């Protein structure tokens, strides 16, 4: 049962990461956490960062679903 709860938490974090990826990248810029780059490539890098954040969220969702299934003995 403990793994099922962990799986739900991971799925929740993953969905939040996918949903709020643009806001997360914007917050990183506001707080100075963005890498230094040329002004010409700033838009491209923002799009890449959003895509990477969404990809990380998708991985968390997948791992969370497997962990949830493991918690109930399905996997």
Image (spheres, helix red, strand yellow):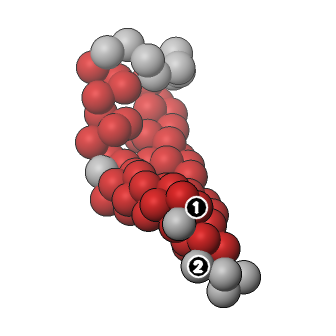
Q: Secondary structure at mark 1?
A: helix
Tag 1 near tag 2, CB within 8 Å = no
Q: Is residue 59 left or right of residue 36?
A: right
When asked about the image quadrant of residue 9, the answer is bottom left
Q: Residues within 10 Å of mark 1 (few under 14, many from 20)?
A: some
Name the residue beneath numbered marker 2: 72
Residue pictured at 53% horizontal, 20% vertical: 35
Q: Position of residue 33 (x, y in %)?
A: 44, 17
Q: Nearer the viewer, residue 21 or 71?
A: 71
- Mark positioned earlier in the residue sequence (1 or 2): 1
Q: Is residue 7 visible?
A: no
Q: Nearer the viewer, residue 60 or 32?
A: 60
Q: Is residue 31 left or right of residue 2?
A: left
Q: Residues within 10 Å of mark 2 (few under 14, many from 20)?
A: few
Q: Quadrant of the C terminus?
A: bottom right
Residue pictured at 53% horizontal, 66% vertical: 1
Residue pictured at 56% horizontal, 52% vertical: 56
Residue pictured at 58% horizontal, 79% vertical: 72
Q: Nearer the viewer, residue 11 or 2?
A: 2
Q: CA distance from mark 1 to mark 2?
A: 8 Å
Residue 3: image tag: 1
Q: Nearer the viewer, residue 19 or 37?
A: 19
Q: Is residue 72 visible?
A: yes
Q: Secondary structure at mark 2?
A: loop
Q: How many marks?
A: 2
State the residue lying farthest toward the front. 1
Q: Is residue 37 above or below residue 72?
A: above
């Amino acid at each position: 049962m403990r793994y099922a709860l962990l799986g739900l938490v991971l799925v929740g974090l993953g969905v939040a990461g996918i949903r709020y990826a643009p806001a997360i990248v914007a917050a990183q810029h506001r707080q100075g956490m963005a890498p230094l780059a040329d002004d010409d490539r700033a838009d491209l890098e923002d799009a890449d960062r959003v895509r990477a954040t969404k990809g990380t969220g998708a991985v968390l969702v997948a791992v969370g679903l497997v962990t949830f299934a493991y918690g109930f003995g399905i996997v």
